[in-house]
Image (tube, helix red, strand yellow):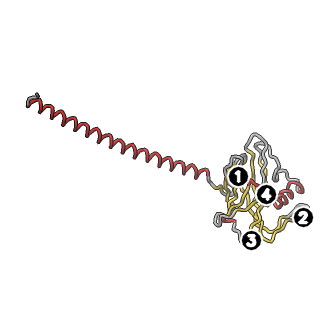
């Protein structure tokens, strides 16, 4: 049997053990809370960084500003609105609506020859969300007036191949309603990397 002094010592040891265990549990809970808060901040920071990176990827370039898209570095030089595209042979292309004629400079940034296709470009209306396909026939009328009839080799047309590191000009034409406002327009180019890049027209 334990004497009175032994019981007191045993009781004191038990109390100390309970206190130490309580402190350890409390400390662990505090650390877990800190770790959770820290992890939440990291996730939030990663989301913020990811959002910023996505915004960088979704930049829309201004008129006269070069923007890389797929194999090309593209710059909008000018945009005109008309209902008649003059052909070099006198065969004009007309519409009862309106043509938006976008004058581009395109530089091949790849080590191989590159070309563009009609499906590479769309014209978007940021206000109505409408999207317009390129009018290939009207575009070729505009480009051939330069390439064939004016013999201007600084221009090229759809499916024409451009050598590496060369810059050429081209016209991209869209038929749109007469009330289409080019101030709300964005030219959208999709390259071989499946990323869309935007260019303001005004």
Which residue is outermost to the left? 4
The circle drawn on residue 190 is 1
- Determine whether 87 is above or below 191 in the image: below
Percent coordinates x, y for residue 132 in the rendering: 73, 62
Q: Which mark is residue 101?
A: none
Instruction: Determine whether the residue tagged by mark 3 lies in a helix, strand or loop.
Output: loop
Quadrant of res 199: bottom right
Closer to the camera in the image, 144 or 119: 119
User: Mark 2 to mark 1: distance in Å?
Assistant: 31 Å
Distance CA(mark 1)–CA(mark 3): 26 Å
Quarter of the figure with the C terminus: bottom right
Query: Which SS class for mark 4?
Result: strand
Vertical arrangement, residue 3 with respect to residue 57, above or below: above
Mark 3 to mark 4 CA distance (whole Å):
20 Å
Residue beneath label 3, please? 178
Q: Is residue 132 left or right of residue 34?
A: right
Tell me how far mark 3 sits from mark 2, CA to CA. Answer: 23 Å
Q: Position of residue 176 (x, y in %)?
A: 75, 67
The residue beneath circle 2 is: 91
According to the picture, the residue beneath numbered tag 4 turns out to be 171
Q: Disc 4 or 1, which lies upstream in sequence?
A: 4
Residue 117, x across and y down, in percent? 78, 52
Residue located at (68% from left, 58% from top): 63
Describe residue 184's horizontal placement relative to residue 27 as left or right: right
């Amino acid at each position: 049997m334990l004497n009175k002094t032994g019981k007191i010592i045993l009781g004191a040891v038990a109390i100390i053990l309970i206190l130490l265990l309580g402190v350890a549990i409390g400390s662990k809970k505090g650390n877990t809370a800190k770790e959770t808060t820290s992890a939440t901040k990291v996730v939030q920071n990663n989301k913020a960084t990811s959002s910023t990176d996505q915004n960088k990827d979704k930049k829309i370039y201004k008129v006269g500003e070069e923007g890389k898209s797929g194999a090309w570095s593209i710059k909008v030089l000018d945009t005109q609105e008309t209902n008649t595209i003059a052909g070099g042979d006198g065969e004009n292309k007309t519409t009862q609506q309106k043509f938006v004629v976008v004058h581009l400079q395109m530089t091949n940034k790849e080590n191989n020859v590159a070309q563009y296709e009609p499906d590479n470009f769309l014209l978007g209306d940021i206000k109505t969300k409408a999207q317009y396909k390129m009018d290939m026939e009207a575009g070729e009328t505009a480009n051939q007036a330069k390439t064939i009839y004016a013999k201007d080799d600084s221009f090229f047309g759809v499916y024409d191949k451009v050598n590496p590191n060369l810059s050429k000009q081209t016209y991209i034409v869209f038929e749109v309603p007469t009330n289409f406002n080019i101030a709300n327009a964005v030219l959208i180019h999709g390259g071989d990397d499946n990323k869309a890049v935007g260019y303001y027209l005004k």
